[in-house]
Image (tube, rainbow, N blue to C red):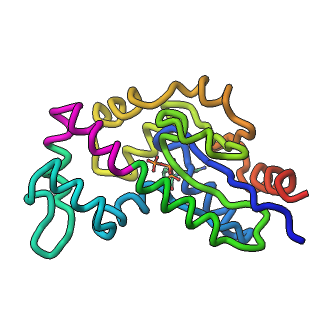
Amino acid sequence: MHQKTLKIGITGGIGSGKTTVCKIFETLGIPIYYADDRAKHLMTADETLITGIQNLFGMAAYAPDGSLNRPYIAQIAFNDPSKLKALNALVHPAVRYDAKMWHESQLNKPYTLQEAALLFENGSYSLFDKIIVVSAPQEVRLQRVLQRDKIDSKAVLARMAQQLPEMDKLNKADFVVYNDGKTLLVPQVMAIHQKLTF
Ligand code: ATP
């Protein structure tokens, strides 16, 4: 009989390279759950969640075609922390349940990976067998995000300030992938894969 499929979480600060590292695991046949992408999907697909969001933000939260009015919600949530908290309290359980169902549907895999920016911050790290932290110096992360997104450095630094400090993440990690732009990624991923497979 195949052993239990391990549940591995992968996290790291904004711009650390979580998605980049996940793509390497994907080439090894490991199923990946991208929590942030999935949350966006559920916000327009999960009826209970949609109703909850409409109750919280009003009917203007959705356009007539059913798409989410992101700028509208962001504007309110940004100015009212209690709304942001309430939104998270709706979205997190929905994602948690969806992720659980997804993990259980992955048969005959040694492990699955779930990518999430805020694994430690929202307490969901306790759901995982092991945690991988992708680490890169703040300056490197900042430059990457500035290059990738149309965003100013003040906005990136504000998001960084909401995340757990790098050192705290490293202390909680079972595995660390150093993505500083100098250390090769593939050998690091292979070493972790080997440990999780044998
Ligand atoms: P976020 O939390 O913002 O979603 P992330 O941790 O998933 O970010 P990625 O999207 O993987 O990070 O990487 C951020 C940007 O940096 C991307 O444009 C990616 O292509 C680039 N990048 C990541 N790692 C490297 C690397 N080792 N060398 C060069 N560019 C890299």
Position of residue 183 measured from the top left corner of the image (x, y, whole percent):
72, 43
Q: In x, y percent, where is residue 103? A: 62, 64
Which segment is the magenta one? 76-91
Q: Which residue is situated farthest in the bottom direction here? A: 65
145 is higher (above) or lower (below) than 53 = above
Query: Magenta includes 82?
Result: yes
- The main secondary structure of the magenta stretch is helix
Instruction: Quadrant for the C terminus, please.
Output: bottom right
Residue at 54% across, 35% down: 120
Q: Quadrant of the N terminus?
A: bottom right
Specify whether residue 62 is painted magenta. Answer: no
Q: Nearer the viewer, residue 139 or 57?
A: 57
Q: Is residue 118 left or right of residue 147?
A: right
Q: Looking at the picture, tell me which residue is in the foreground, 76 or 94.
A: 94
Quarter of image, res 179: top right
Q: Position of residue 58 (x, y in %)?
A: 9, 53
Residue drawn at x 56%, y 28% is 166
Q: Residue at x 21, y 60 (%)?
A: 51
Residue in the foreground of this view, choosing between 60 and 187: 60
User: Does 197 appear above or below 133?
Assistant: below
98 lies left or right of 6: left
Residue appearing at x 60%, y 30% in the figure: 169
Percent across and percent down for residue 77 are 20, 40
Q: How many marks?
A: 0
Side (left or right) of 86 relative to 159? left
